[in-house]
Amino acid sequence: MNSKFIVIEGLEGAGKSTACRKIITTLYQHGIKNVIYTREPGGTPIAEQLRTLIQQKRISKEKITDSAELLMLYAARIQLVENVIKPALANGSWVIGDRHDLSSHAYQGGGRRIKHNFIHYLKKEILGDFSPDLTLYLDITPEISLQRTRNRGFLDRIELENLSFFTRTRNRYLKLALEDKRIKIIDATQKPQKVTYELNKTITQWLKQSCIF
Ligand code: Z5A
């Protein structure tokens, strides 16, 4: 059975971490037991250090520029892809990714307004043709996202952005999801049980369509 790379995307608080756990269980029930979980940014020692740099509120008075943030995200991503994801796929494992490249197009492209052509150029140069087999985008409004993350009490550097930043991010997610049939949109404003039901349905249909069982 060919191994696959499945990615979960969405605003913070969309339920990505919860969804990753559920998907691993669904795959297990379908006999796919060799599955690893990755998160971005992060997932290797160097990528985790970059994650800390990206998320930390303040290291000194020095501001992280938008371009530096984007480059650090791609540096973390390629460390993870080359050292963890590709070797796992080559060994027959499936990979469930908590965020991947689409996040940069949504947050840095939509949220930070970095030019699409520049991000696309980086993606092509750094990742080449490597991309997920399936992406599940958990759609919530920025208002729900802020409500869920603020309930947690701790906000990192990106979570401190304002509502219009997250509105632009969500709009970019939706635009890109509607343009690419490998991205499925799940309404994640619904109750957790309903979101889990939709996830299972979408994954099961996709497994059938891809002739995986
Ligand atoms: N970032 C970027 O800018 N560019 C990039 O290229 C990449 C990332 C890769 C990573 O944050 C940050 O990096 C992120 C984007 C940026 N920052 N922002 N802002 P992270 O990895 O630390 O966290 P996150 O990805 O934003 O996820 P999260 O906050 O941990 O949320 P989540 O994984 O989507 O949700 P969860 O932990 O499963 O659930 C959150 C809470 O909501 C929890 O209390 C649940 O019980 C609740 N929940 C979940 N689903 C529901 C439903 N359906 N109803 C009610 N409550 C729910």
Image (cartoon, rainbow, N blue to C red):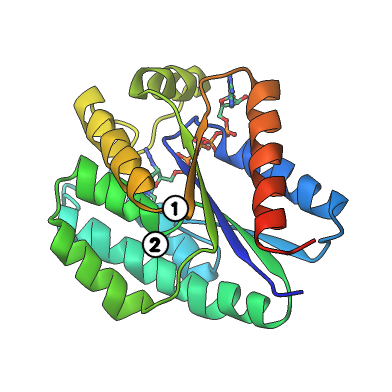
Q: Is residue 136 above or below residue 31?
A: above
Q: Secondary structure at mark 2?
A: helix
From where the camera sits, is residue 161 visible?
no
Image quarter where the C terminus lies is bottom right
The three-letter code of the residue at mark 1 reads Lys
Tags 2 and 1 in contact by the CB under 8 Å rule?
A: no
Q: Disc 2 marks which residue?
A: 50
From the top left corner, tell me how far across and down residue 175 is, in percent: 29, 42
Q: Which mark is residue 181?
A: 1
Q: Is residue 210 above or below residue 163?
A: below
Q: Is residue 111 above or below residue 47?
A: above
Relative horizontal placement of residue 63, taking residue 194 as reference (left or right): left
From the top left corner, tell me how far across and down residue 201 is, in percent: 69, 38
Image quarter where the N terminus lies is bottom right
From the top left corner, tell me how far across and down residue 21 is, in percent: 71, 44
| Residue 128: quarter of image | bottom left
Which tag, 2 or 1, sits closer to the chain's start?
Answer: 2
From where the camera sits, is residue 122 visible?
yes
Relative horizontal placement of residue 90, taking residue 52 as reference (left or right): right
Q: Nearer the viewer, residue 65 or 8?
A: 8
Q: Which mark is residue 129?
A: none
Q: Nearer the viewer, residue 144 or 193?
A: 193
Q: Residues within 10 Å of mark 1 (few under 14, many from 20)?
A: few
Relative horizontal placement of residue 12, taking residue 5 as reference (left or right): left
Q: Residue at x 39, y 22 (%)?
A: 146
Q: Secondary structure at mark 1?
A: loop
Q: Residue at x 28, y 31 (%)?
A: 166
Q: Residue at x 32, y 54 (%)?
A: 104
| Residue 174: quarter of image | top left
